[in-house]
Image (cartoon, rainbow, N blue to C red):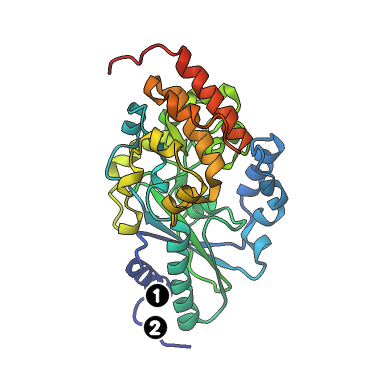
């Protein structure tokens, strides 16, 4: 085995991780039981996963990191800051433009982070031996409770990770290893009596603090949900067409957040507040071209334009009637229904109020 410097193995890993652009690094043992398995079981039993059947199907593998990989002994959990240079809530005021979740305004983080995790994992294996496996979001690994166990932050009342250093804006990646690495202390919960994230939710998607009903969450509805979105939630969407940042953006811990250092995670100019009429006009080819390299591409043109049409219907802007009416004969049945809803809303809508 290669001789280490005076640093401990975890110190060396931290230094190398920072060189690769990770701002938050923590270590956790994955040999003990954890409460996350029970929380997942309750979430699925309540039906709060909606149509995400893959969550139920993979629940046994998600129950514990060693269920996914029995040889795992430790986890290296890493966070990359994607803090915005603007207040995401401001985008909700421009009703004729689209509001896109901060994480989707830049390059798709999956490929970016996975490549760097593989590089770090290779260095760990070369220097320390043992086996490693890397994970970014798409694998059946519960990364938020693992990040809390590794000391990166805590799961707030909105169920998302909150960091004292970076607020709400951390992309997570994990490396499981067969090595025994010294663990960090788990993070304590610092939410206190605050319930800002619960109170701002436009659809009341939190049945109780620390519980989310995805079926009412606009992130789930605009990204994961296929088919028409229930009319109960359409008005509450406002101009949100991909995700929702409300509960993240309002968190008081964001006062410590910084703008992302990684330039590939900075918002593209054409995705900060694109005009709804422009997005509604995208056909299949132009949709794929515009969102190449973006996480938005994975939901497909039909689901995306469906969301755009709901936003048009909510805009109160009669100049957008033609943009919606142009899709009344779209080949996609869901798009046609959404277009009819939008036209109906705008022809009955009163003029938008002055700001």
Which residue is disc 2 drawn over?
Answer: 4
Discs 1, 2 touching: Cβ within 8 Å: yes
Q: In which quarter of the image is the C terminus?
A: top left
Question: Could you say whether the residue bearing mark 1 is in a helix, strand or loop?
Answer: loop
Instruction: Looking at the picture, tell me which residue is in the foreground, 170 or 101.
Output: 101
Asked if residue 348 is positioned above or below residue 264 in the image, the reply reads above
Instruction: Looking at the picture, tell me which residue is in the foreground, 9 or 86.
Output: 86
- Please rate how many residues cluster around mark 1, counting C-alpha atoms within 10 Å: few if below 14, some from 14 to 19, many from 20: few
The mark tally for this picture is 2
Identify the residue at image location x=59%, y=36%: 214
Identify the residue at image location x=39%, y=20%: 318
In this rendering, position of residue 255 left or right of residue 106: left
In this rendering, position of residue 307 left or right of residue 248: right
Any mark on residue 8, and which? 1
- On the image, the x and y values in percent for residue 186 come to 47, 53
Residue 221 shows up from this direction: yes
Identify the residue at image location x=55%, y=47%: 300
Image quadrant of residue 215? top right
């Amino acid at each position: 085995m290669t001789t280490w410097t005076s640093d401990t193995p975890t110190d060396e890993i931290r230094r190398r991780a920072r060189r690769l652009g990770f701002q938050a690094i923590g270590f956790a043992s994955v040999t003990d039981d954890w409460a996350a398995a029970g929380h997942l079981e309750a979430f699925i039993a309540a039906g709060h996963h909606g149509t995400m059947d893959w969550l139920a199907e993979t629940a046994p593998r998600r129950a514990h990191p060693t269920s996914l990989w029995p040889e795992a002994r430790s986890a290296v959990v890493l966070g990359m800051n994607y803090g915005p240079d603007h207040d995401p809530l401001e985008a909700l005021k421009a009703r004729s433009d689209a509001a896109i979740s901060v994480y989707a305004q830049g390059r798709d983080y999956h490929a970016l982070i996975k490549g760097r995790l593989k590089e770090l994992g290779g260095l760990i294996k070369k220097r320390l031996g043992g086996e490693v496996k890397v994970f970014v979001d798409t694998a059946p690994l519960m990364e938020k409770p693992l990040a809390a166990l590794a000391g990166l932050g805590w799961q707030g009342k909105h169920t998302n990770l909150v960091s004292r250093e970076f607020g709400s804006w951390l992309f997570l990646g994990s490396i499981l290893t067969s090595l025994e690495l010294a663990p960090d202390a788990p993070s304590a919960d610092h939410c206190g009596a605050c319930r800002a994230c619960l109170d701002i939710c436009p659809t009341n998607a939190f049945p109780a603090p620390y519980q989310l009903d995805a079926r009412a969450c606009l992130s789930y509805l605009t990204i994961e949900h296929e088919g028409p979105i229930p009319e109960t939630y359409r008005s509450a969407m406002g101009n949100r067409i991909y995700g929702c940042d409300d509960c993240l953006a309002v968190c008081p811990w964001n006062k410590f957040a910084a703008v992302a250092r990684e330039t590939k995670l900075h918002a593209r100019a054409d995705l900060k507040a694109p005009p709804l009429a422009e997005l509604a006009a995208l056909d299949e080819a132009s949709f794929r071209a515009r969102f190449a390299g973006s996480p938005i591409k994975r939901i497909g043109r039909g689901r995306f334009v469906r969301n755009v049409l709901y936003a048009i219907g909510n805009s109160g802007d009669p100049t957008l009637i033609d943009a919606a009416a142009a899709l009344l004969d779209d080949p996609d049945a869901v798009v046609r229904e959404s277009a009819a809803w939008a036209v109906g809303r705008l022809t009955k809508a009163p003029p938008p109020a002055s700001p």
